[in-house]
Amino acid sequence: MSGINPAAPRRRSRFSELALETLIRILGFSTIGFVGLIFLFLLREGLPVFFEVPPGSLFSARWYPTFGIFGTLPLILGSLLVTFLSIIIALPLGVATAVFVREVAPRWTREILKPIIEVLAGIPSVVLGFFGMTIVAPLVREILGAPTGLTAFSGAFLLAYMALPTIISVAEDALDAVPRGYRDASLAMGATKWQTIWRVVVPAARSGILTAVMLGMGRAIGETMAVMMVTGNAGVLPTSLEAIIRPVRTMTATIAAEMGEVARGSTHYHALFGIGIILFVVTFLINLTAASAIFRARRKGGLR
Amino acid sequence: MIPGRLYRWAALACLAAGLAAGCAGRTSGGTNQGAEAPAKAIASIQDIGSDTLVNLALAWAEHYMSDHPEVRISVTGGGSGTGIAALINGTTQIANASREMSVEELAEARKNGIEPVRFTVALDAIAVVANPANPITGLTLQQLSGLYTGVITRWTEVGGANRPVVLLSRESNSGTYVYFLEQVIRLGDPKGKALFSPETLLMPSSQGISSEIQQNPNAIGYDGLGYVTPEVKTIAVARTAAGPFVTPSARTVLDKSYPIARPLFMYTAGEPKGAVKAYLDWVMGDGQKIVKDIGFVPLAGGGK
């Protein structure tokens, strides 16, 4: 403000500028500090389990915390199964929607669609979970012939819907960043609109679409409530393809379901925080992959 | 420009002052409360024991304290044994127990000059429930154990339809989980090693169990009798194949013909007097109204 008004007294403006700048800097750094503190807390509460329980049984196939059996393998695989399944469902839907909104839809349709997609992001997960329990689960049981509708697939289906808004809006931004010249050149060469979209625009935006998928995955793996309500929470090791339509137990649901009653400082308590650490590491790796994809694309000087 | 900036700083100062005032206000409020409190004599009651009873005991204490601010009741879990030990040592006025005191415990109490008095405060019955479309009407404890350990996997093996069995349970931290494990899966054998089948779906809430039972003809579940809704079918249970098959109700629980039920007790050291007596009278009188909400069976006639 004072920069554009040379008439303002110099000293004061410098002082206030400095004060504000310091304040903003403190606030910015405090965010990093909070993340660091949370991570430290997680380590302090969770690391003991890696000493209390031998690594062999920590990654065994049974999770019976009430009887001192802490095998986290079914939980880790359960989370991964549900997450990957949800991305397999959400990726084609999300990219197709983004292409439609950005490239195909007339202006008025786009104006209606975009806010609706944002509303989709705002649905509380417990509401989706309830919807899943009463509508999706019976359909899964009847159509796919599973013994129960509370399956990995039902959870993945809901998660796909939760990841969709993220995937659509990020993918749409990526498509938006493709220069107009690409489209014009393609059309001028005699390509149809369809060919232009699938052979030129989407490939040019692929790193942005990859980022969208990674962000969607980050959203899906951390989701708790809806997953806890529809996946059945049975700690079975998902070993065959059939596991898709069988119940699974995820890491997040385990923490949420058991943290309420666990005795502070017990092995079970540390084990739950240990699962938190594993979850944190997995999410961190996913975000890191996404960030490096963006970084690589930027360095190439290409498009997002 | 300058007045604008001054105004901004003034606003910031006001904000800071407001925060300080808010803090000061809260502190002075605290001291006021402290000054008022000693005007009335506070009767404080310790209530220690059974983890099964702890939620009910907490609910009772909260209700009672809101109507009787002169009484402070602190409820602690830890198990029936813990509560009884505290009663024998004289560190608690009320011990919650989900079993009767053993002969040894009674002898030890008498040695300390304490004559424990037993009050039945509620009944805990576990109802076995299934979908109304399931033709099964009765099961023996042996069959239930076979089902829940995963030995029996199809309903035909217990005389039902040719369908897979889907097992439902509450999360492992609930009191009914442990009781069901001990009394049904291990058939009351304290040295039993049997566990829930890993295929068991662990539901985060009673609502989750009844919702899945209602829509899935393959499912079988159990829960506190107070949580059973009319939309599900209650299965009659027999101790042996010869019968009789008994459905749970306040009557069959009280006359002990229903096998998966137990009375819940509060023990006092000697005949209760004063605030403890008033509290116990309330528990067995008006307090029975909230018993059903916590999932237990209220006393029919009340009393010892």
Image (cartoon, grey):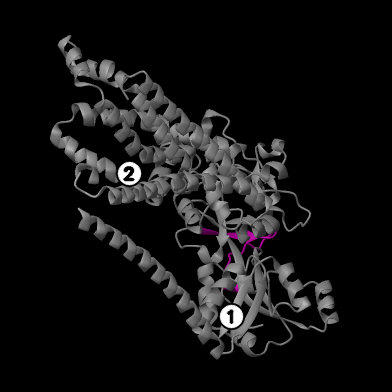
Q: In this image, A150 relative to B154: left or right?
A: left
B106 or B125, nearer to the observer: B106
Whether the residues at callouts 1 and 2 have beta carbons within 8 Å, the answer is no
**Numbered badge on residue A121:** 2
Label 2 element class = helix
Give me the residue at 27% from left, 18% from top. Answer: A198
Which stretch did the figure color magenta?
A: B233-251
Q: Position of residue B58 (x, y in %)?
A: 57, 72
Left or right of B79, for residue A43: left
Locate residue A36, reporting x and y percent: 52, 44
Q: Position of residue A177 (x, y in %)?
A: 26, 26
Q: Is residue B116 left or right of residue A204?
A: right
Give the left or right position of residue B53, taking residue A139 as reference. Answer: right
Q: Residue at horizontal 53%, vertical 80%?
A: B65
Work out whether residue B69 can be spotted.
Answer: no
Amino acid marked by disc 1: Arg
Give the amino acid at mark 2.
Ala
Q: Residue at x 76, y 52 (%)?
A: B192
Q: Dot 1 surroundings within 10 Å: few (below 14), some, or many (20 or more)?
A: some
| Residue B237 in sight | yes
Label 2 crowding class (10 Å Cα cut-off): few <14, some 14-19, many 20+?
A: some
Mark 1 lies on residue: B72
The quarter of the picture where residue B10 lies is bottom left
User: Is A93 part of what is drawn in magenta?
Assistant: no
User: Cα distance, mark 1 to mark 2?
Assistant: 46 Å
At mark 1, the secondary structure is strand
Q: Which chain is mark 2 on?
A: A
Name the disc covering residue B52, or none. none
Is residue B228 placed above or below B109 in the rendered structure? above
Q: Tell which residue pokes out farthest to the top in this image.
A: A189
Query: Residue B259, relative to residue B152: is it above or below?
Result: below
For the C terminus of chain A, give its image quadrant.
top left
